[in-house]
Image (spheres, grey):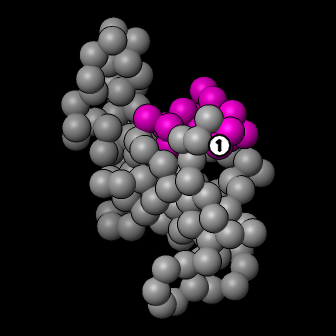
Amino acid sequence: MARKIDIIDGRSALDAVRDADAAGAKPQRTDLATAVRYLLQLLDEKAPGNSVEVRVPPFGAVQVIQGPRHTRGTPPNVVEMDAATWIAVATGAEAWTDAAAAGRIHASGTRADLSDVLPVRP
């Protein structure tokens, strides 16, 4: 990840996304991007490592969870989802198992279940 997102900026962006969702409006792209990256940053702080790549295109990706280090090509453990799903599971608004069962999380690999490290506490 690039620069570290300040807790105040991260929480403000997350609040702006939640407010837009509550109003039935589309969140500002910059707020959405900051909220996604902030939550990825918190996941990286909570579960550092290199064995699972979490992708939230087009906003960000992070490698987390202790285990075998991945260095080239497609990692063996990949988790990918859209921004709304990531924000929901990362904040605890939706359970990992529910989002996965609904097909909104694409996870491959033996370590690609993040239910033990989610939600993060924004």
Residue displayed at 77% across by 51% down: 116
Q: Secondary structure at mark 1?
A: helix
Residue displayed at 72% across by 67% down: 111
Position of the N terminus, as image quadrant, is bottom left
**The quadrant where residue 76 appears:** bottom right
Position of the C terminus, as image quadrant, is top right
**The quadrant where residue 25 appears:** top left
- Residue 3 placed where, x, y %? 32, 63
- 116 and 122: which one is in front? 116
- Residue 118 placed where, x, y %? 68, 45
120 relative to 79, above or below: above
Asked whether residue 28 appears in the rendered view, the answer is yes
Residue beneath label 1, please? 100
Residue displayed at 57% across by 85% down: 70
- Residue 47 placed where, x, y %? 66, 62
Asked whether residue 64 appears in the rendered view, the answer is no
Q: Which residues are magenta?
A: 84-101
Return the residue found at the far top: 23
88 within the magenta span: yes
Q: Main secondary structure of the magenta part?
A: helix
Q: Amino acid at mark 1?
A: Ala
Label count reads: 1
Rate crowding at label 1 as few (under 14), some (14 to 19) or many (20 or more) other CA atoms within 10 Å.
some
